[in-house]
Image (tube, rainbow, N blue to C red):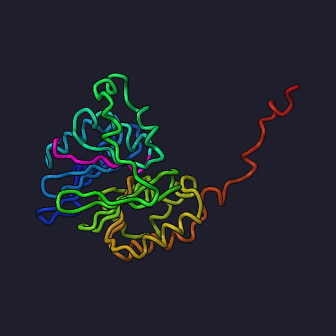
Amino acid sequence: MSKTTSYTLFDNGEHKCIVFTSLVKGEGVQANQFLIVNGQDGAIIDPGGDLTYTPLTMELFKYIRLDNIRYVFGSHQDPDIITSMPRWLMHTKAKIVASRLWARFLPHLNSAFTMDKMEGEWFERLIELPDEGLSLPLGQSELFSIPAHFLHSVGNFQFYDPISKVLFSGDLGASLSGDPQTPVQNFQAHIPHMKSFHQRYMCSNRVLRYWVDMVKDMDIEMIVPQHGAPFAGRESIEQLLDWLWDLPCGVDIMDKNIFRCPEKIATMG
């Protein structure tokens, strides 16, 4: 890949948003990781797993000291989102921010060594997000967790930065090919890169419409998904919202014929 591993979404001198786009090597699905810095304080969004931990920390040193990372946000529980959590707990003082629905599952990611080292500190380091979300202070600013449940996880959040006006949208808006550093220019041409993923991974059109109704009134200048290209400017964002509003997906289109008892089982006995 000829482009650099990271690029700056926003920088006003005091507040920065950085995207890391090409840390996944080999057969892993391309994934974006995010750093937000306000003053000396930083937050990481969807840092990934062991595959990305070492290259991500090496990149982070260009922008922030690990001791200044206050939060590690996980939009949901997938391996490419948060399975590096034990390393962040061991090597930073950051708190883990995730849905309350996953709070009791996340300790399963920790090794016995990690749990022994933490000596019961785990739940003091976890911020459980209620279904409606909340805001958390970062330096002189704050970050908002935005509900996106069932898009695609049962406990799913997106994260909104009010200074850059960027919505970090997780898997919603994701594309599985194309350049993750170049905003979508031709929306119609981009649809084939998104459609099959959204139709299988998003729960239903009903939930998509709940989300669109919420987001259309937010002051957003860019939507940046965890995979693929961002959507920059109101025209591109509104095209995405219009497309999602009409998209049948998940249980809307699931074929009941898939749910068939295998013939061998049906005829046993």
Rendering coords of residue 245 (x, y %): 54, 71
Q: Is residue 4 above or below residue 269?
A: below
Using the image as rendered, state which of residue 240 and residue 124 is in the foreground.
Answer: 124
- Residue 68 lies within the magenta run: yes
Residue at 33 percent across and 71 percent down: it is: 220
Q: Is residue 38 left or right of residue 229?
A: left
Residue at 25 percent across and 42 percent down: it is: 56
Residue at 48 percent across and 51 percent down: it is: 155
Using the image as rendered, state which of residue 171 and residue 214 is in the foreground.
Answer: 214
Looking at the image, the residue that sits furthest to the right is 269
Rendering coords of residue 69 (x, y %): 21, 46
Rendering coords of residue 90 (x, y %): 26, 32
Quadrant assignment, res 7: bottom left
Q: In this view, does 221 lie above or below 137?
A: below
Quadrant assignment, res 185: bottom left
Q: In this view, does 83 lie above or below 34?
A: above
Tell me the quadrant of the picture where the C terminus can be found.
top right
Rendering coords of residue 98 (x, y %): 39, 48
Quadrant assignment, res 140: bottom left
Which span of residues is magenta-colored? 67-76
Number of marks in the rendered image: 0
- Residue 228 lies within the magenta run: no
